[in-house]
Image: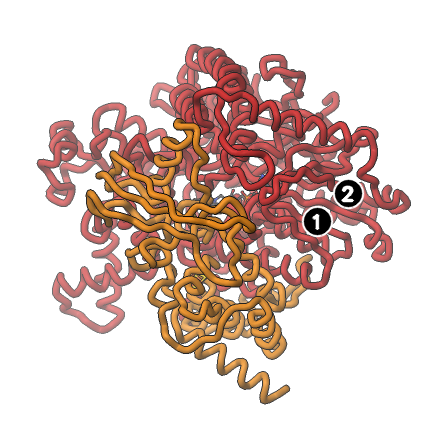
């Protein structure tokens, strides 16, 4: 396959970026999207040019590093996949592909396609944990049985990879889906209940401080989420938040 | 044994750890506030260590090259984590876990460490559940288990095929709590470039800020390296792309011995290589072998027809299939350990029975599991006369509930539906059992430099059993290191803050800068990947699943020549002041080019076959590994002396007081 690429190039946070055109030949269907970029980069290096910088690590769809806006969609056209698991067989010979970084005020560009998503970490630092001592002496793990459905739902919420596609997909750049997934994981477990009130308040406060937009229930986040994190989590978080503020 | 003092406590095996903990020196809580610890790496080992050390009251600085600790390579672990809880009542115990691990490692690990690991294993599950890790549960609300290769009990705890993710998020949340309290200061997108020694003790690191390119000095009273394994020396592996040996190798150059570099695990169930452009290999969790049966065609003509696309695997009758693991190893069948399963697959493919285009793949088939589960489910639902379509559907649903995300991943990559046609798998580089030599306290041969998780060598011997790396990482981080490091730090309560203005820091920083400048000024013609791929090919062909003296000797010469060429001819575009992925890769590959040679040298010295180290010259008539306990019952610990060829071998004799060394058999 031969492809035309339009890629966002930006030297650093303080320099203005621009779209640059590239053509690439010999793309095969079983290459991943990132492997296609590797081939492009190899070519650029051989020509003495600077390769395109993008974030990636596991290339297995689990670390949440890769983050490309492909033809206007986070992680590209395929559903329930990350960019590293998107394969070129989803494209056709002669296609033009527009590749941009995730765009949101709370995710400043660092270079080319790399953005800073540490706002997510700060939301979790504000309360996304259970306050238990880490040096042992906890109760036996089977001492508190947990309903299978609850445990499964908690697990599904916990599978969020923190990629930020939900933010990039949202017209308000809201971080509701991400934050609600984190809140839900703990809200569903008996271990997490004790400090539920502070947790949801602190996390929501931090989310707002980071400059994410408001949620207007458009649902684009759920559509683009590579892990299928459901909108139910947002509803659950809203309930948690409401009961927290009522209590408070 | 000379300079290698393992510091294993005396006394009966099962009492060593408790006794040791009782005798260890403690640091008064008020004094912990005056002590700084650097933890490099925030995977399971580093993340859990950092959280616990901070919890205890030390000031912790963490470093990782990703933008967030939550993205460390541990996130990718799929199958599960072992613990001797005996919840299933199938006869498990700490002793049995200890025994399985020692045997699985082909008797090349340290008894006392492994026993401690088995003892702590049960604790880990309790800890993680308390932290909110959502492990799989059964309908009674209790924790569910499954089994992994090399064992006959069900002791693996899991969260679908995403166990590593859930455990790492647990450790990361514990870190977050400490970050929020100000006890951990995280330095993400930072790479450790060197270690700084003052008066022979590890007192800090030189790191590069990967966003600004700045070279920074960081001091501490002790340095913990939890930087993961070095499987990426093979270029293609299941490791995350950024996994590297740099931190361990830099410590090695400063005096930490590197142990058993040639012990590499090849994992039997990976998605086969598809082409030259491939950047990495994807693992299909070993847990699939609980239900998947492995086979190739019995007749070579059938294999050929399949490769040419003239025959479909589902068309092949049961009696025309060779379930070679079940045939060769009736007791363990598809659940033999990884090294055994990998070699058996290679043997069949080498003999011409491979089933994909390249001839390097075997089948992992779920058809009979679908039927088995389907029938069971139909009965439990009271459907006595369910038709075959219903049974198949019910069976598929059960398989989906167990392995859904793995099946989905396979389909995305291979573009085939594994519910309808058997998966194709082939062995790939996965895990490195070698690493920095550590004593019982997890201290390296540099005072004050500790090493935990995959980066050290201690617990898995020549082969790691499934689901035990996560266990080791968390045991080291939550329960071992926080104790043992106190013993060392108790001497530091009056030291005060360590200055970064000393000549030692200045010197180390200058060395790092010079090295970067040297890399940048090579201005040659080849990209870093060009060298990495070349190195990987040498490693796979000559130091891979099977090795022989001639190949290893060639590898040593070839790697050393490749290294010389790299330093002359590598081409790194861009600058040093800012983000530059090529420069990052170059530094890592430069170290792989040294490690690779030491790896080959270690493999050459070890004239026996054990675990993942298979020397073709040493095998039984049936093609099984032939160990030589008389001459090689030791850990090889290499001392840095300049070029890898000059490295000096030290031996730590392995003492087995509680286990009789037997030939490993899974028949
Ligand atoms: C696909 C896959 C599946 C697996 N499945 C299982 C399983 O089911 N069960 C099991 O028990 N094991 C499994 N393993 C093995 C297990 O995941 C690893 O051995 C384990 O997670 C390693 O943990 P770690 O903390 O030692 O290192 P890692 O998680 O690799 O962490 C290394 C850390 O070091 C940092 N780092 C490295 N170098 C530097 C540097 N120079 N400067 C700064 N930071 C640095 C990284 O940023 C990272 O934070 C699997 C492995 C893979 C690849
Ligand atoms: S909710 Fe989905 S899209 Fe958002 S960060 Fe998590 S995984 Fe990514
Ligand atoms: S690189 Fe890890 S999710 Fe894509």
| Within-10-Å neighbours for mark 1: few <14, some 14–19, many 20+ | many
| For marks 2 and 1 on the same chain, the one whose residue lies earlier in the sequence | 1
**Considering only vertical position in the picture, is B383 above or below A168?**
below
Q: Are marks 2 and 1 in contact (CB under 8 Å)?
A: yes
Q: Is residue B400 left or right of residue B640?
A: left
Q: Secondary structure at mark 2?
A: loop
* Residue B383, numbered circle: none
Judging from the image, mark 1 belongs to the subunit labelled B
Ligand 1 under 8 Å from disc 1 Cβ: no
**Which chain is depicted red?**
B
Please report the residue visible at 68 percent of the width from the left and 47 percent of the height from the top.
B480
In the rendered view, how is the structure colored? by chain
Disc 2: host chain? B
- Residue for point 21% across, 34% down: B355
| Residue B524 coordinates in the image, percent (x, y) | 48, 20
Residue extending furthest toward the left:
B310
Residue drawn 40% across and 58% down?
B160
- Give the number of the disc on residue B61: 1
Quarter-wise, where is residue B525 in the image? top left
Image colour for chain A is orange
The answer to whether residue B260 is left or right of residue B280 is right
The picture places residue A225, in percent across and down from the top left corner, at: 38, 62
Near-viewer residue (A25 or B485): A25
Evaluate whether residue B470 shows in this view.
no
């Amino acid at each position: 396959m031969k492809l035309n690429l339009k890629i966002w190039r930006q030297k650093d946070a303080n320099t203005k970026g621009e779209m640059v055109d590239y053509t690439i030949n010999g793309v095969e269907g079983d290459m991943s999207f990132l492997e296609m970029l590797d081939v492009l980069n190899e070519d650029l290096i051989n020509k003495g040019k600077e390769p395109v910088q993008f974030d990636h690590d596991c290339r297995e769809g689990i670390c949440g590093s890769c983050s490309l806006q492909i033809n206007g969609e986070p992680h590209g056209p395929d559903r329930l996949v990350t960019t590293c698991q998107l394969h070129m067989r989803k494209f056709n010979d002669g296609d033009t592909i527009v590749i941009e970084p995730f765009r949101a005020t709370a995710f400043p560009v660092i270079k080319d396609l790399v953005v800073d998503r540490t706002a997510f970490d700060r939301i979790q630092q504000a309360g996304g944990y259970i306050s238990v001592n880490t040096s042992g002496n906890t109760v036996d793990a089977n001492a508190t049985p947990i309903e299978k459905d609850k445990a499964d739902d908690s697990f599904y919420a916990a599978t969020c990879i923190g990629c930020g596609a939900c933010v990039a997909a949202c017209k308000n750049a809201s971080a509701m889906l991400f934050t609600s997934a984190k809140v839900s994981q703990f809200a569903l477990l008996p271990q997490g209940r004790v400090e539920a009130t502070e947790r949801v308040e602190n996390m929501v406060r931090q989310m707002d401080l980071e400059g994410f937009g408001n949620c207007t229930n458009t649902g684009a986040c759920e559509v683009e989420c590579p892990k299928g994190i459901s909108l139910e989590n947002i509803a659950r978080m809203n309930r948690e938040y409401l009961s927290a503020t009522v209590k408070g | 044994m000379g300079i290698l003092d393992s510091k294993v406590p005396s006394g009966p095996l099962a009492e060593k750890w408790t006794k040791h903990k009782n005798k260890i020196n403690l640091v008064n809580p008020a004094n912990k506030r005056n002590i700084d610890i650097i933890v490099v790496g925030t995977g399971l080992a580093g993340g859990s260590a950092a959280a616990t050390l901070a919890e205890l009251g030390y000031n912790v600085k963490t470093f990782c090259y990703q933008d967030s600790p939550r993205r460390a390579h541990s996130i990718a672990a799929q199958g599960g984590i072992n613990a001797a809880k005996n919840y299933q009542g199938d006869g498990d115990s700490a002793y049995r876990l200890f025994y399985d691990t020692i045997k699985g490692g082909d008797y090349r690990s340290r008894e006392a460490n492994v026993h401690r690991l088995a003892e702590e294993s049960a604790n880990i599950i309790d800890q993680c559940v308390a932290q909110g890790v959502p492990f799989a549960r059964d309908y009674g609300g209790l924790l569910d288990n499954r089994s992994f290769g090399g064992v006959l009990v069900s002791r693996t705890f899991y969260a679908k095929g995403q166990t590593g993710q859930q455990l790492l998020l647990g450790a990361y949340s514990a870190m977050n709590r400490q970050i929020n309290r100000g006890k951990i200061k995280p330095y993400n997108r930072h790479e450790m470039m060197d270690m700084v020694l003052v008066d022979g003790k590890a007192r800090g690191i030189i790191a590069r800020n990967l966003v600004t390119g700045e070279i920074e000095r960081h001091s501490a009273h002790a340095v913990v390296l939890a930087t993961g394994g070095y499987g990426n020396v093979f270029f293609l592996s299941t490791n995350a792309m950024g996994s590297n040996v740099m931190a361990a190798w830099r410590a090695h150059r400063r005096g930490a011995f590197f142990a058993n570099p040639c012990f590499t695990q090849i994992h039997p169930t990976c998605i086969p290589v598809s082409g030259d452009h491939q950047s990495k290999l994807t693992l299909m969790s070993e847990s699939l072998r609980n239900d998947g049966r492995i086979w190739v065609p019995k007749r070579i003509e059938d294999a050929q027809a399949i490769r040419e696309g003239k025959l479909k695997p589902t068309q092949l009758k049961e009696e025309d299939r060779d379930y070679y693991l079940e045939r060769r190893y009736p007791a363990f069948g598809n659940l033999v350990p990884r090294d055994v399963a990998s070699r058996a697959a290679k043997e069949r493919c080498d003999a011409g029975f491979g089933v994909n285009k390249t001839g390097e793949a075997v089948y992992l088939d779920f058809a009979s599991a679908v039927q088995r589960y389907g029938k069971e489910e139909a009965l439990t639902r009271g459907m006595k006369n369910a038709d075959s379509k219903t049974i198949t559907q019910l069976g598929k649903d059960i398989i989906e509930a167990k392995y859904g995300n793995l099946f989905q991943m396979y389909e995305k990559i291979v573009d085939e539906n594994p519910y309808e046609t058997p998966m194709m798998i082939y062995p790939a580089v996965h895990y490195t059992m070698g690493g920095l030599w550590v004593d019982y306290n997890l201290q390296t041969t540099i005072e004050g430099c500790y090493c935990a998780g995959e980066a050290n060598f201690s617990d898995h011997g020549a082969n790691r059993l499934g689901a035990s790396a996560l266990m080791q990482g968390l045991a080291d981080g939550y329960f071992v290191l926080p104790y043992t490091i106190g013993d060392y730090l108790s001497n530091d309560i009056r030291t005060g803050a360590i200055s970064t203005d000393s000549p030692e820091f200045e010197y180390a920083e200058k060395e790092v800068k010079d090295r970067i400048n040297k890399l940048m000024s090579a201005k040659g013609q080849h990209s870093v990947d060009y060298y990495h791929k070349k190195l990987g090919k040498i490693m796979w062909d000559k130091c891979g699943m099977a090795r022989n003296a001639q190949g290893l000797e060639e590898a040593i010469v070839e790697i050393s020549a490749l290294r010389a060429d790299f330093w002359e001819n590598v081409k790194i575009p861009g600058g040093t002041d800012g983000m530059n992925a090529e420069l990052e890769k170059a530094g890592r590959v430069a170290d792989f080019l040294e490690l690779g040679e030491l790896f080959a040298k270690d493999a050459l010295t070890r004239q026996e076959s054990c675990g993942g180290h298979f020397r073709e010259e040493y095998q039984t008539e049936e093609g099984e590994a032939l160990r030589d306990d008389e001459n090689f019952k030791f850990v090889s610990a290499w001392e840095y002396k300049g070029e890898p060829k000059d490295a000096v071998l030290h031996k730590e004799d392995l003492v087995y007081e509680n286990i009789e060394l037997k030939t490993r058999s899974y028949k």
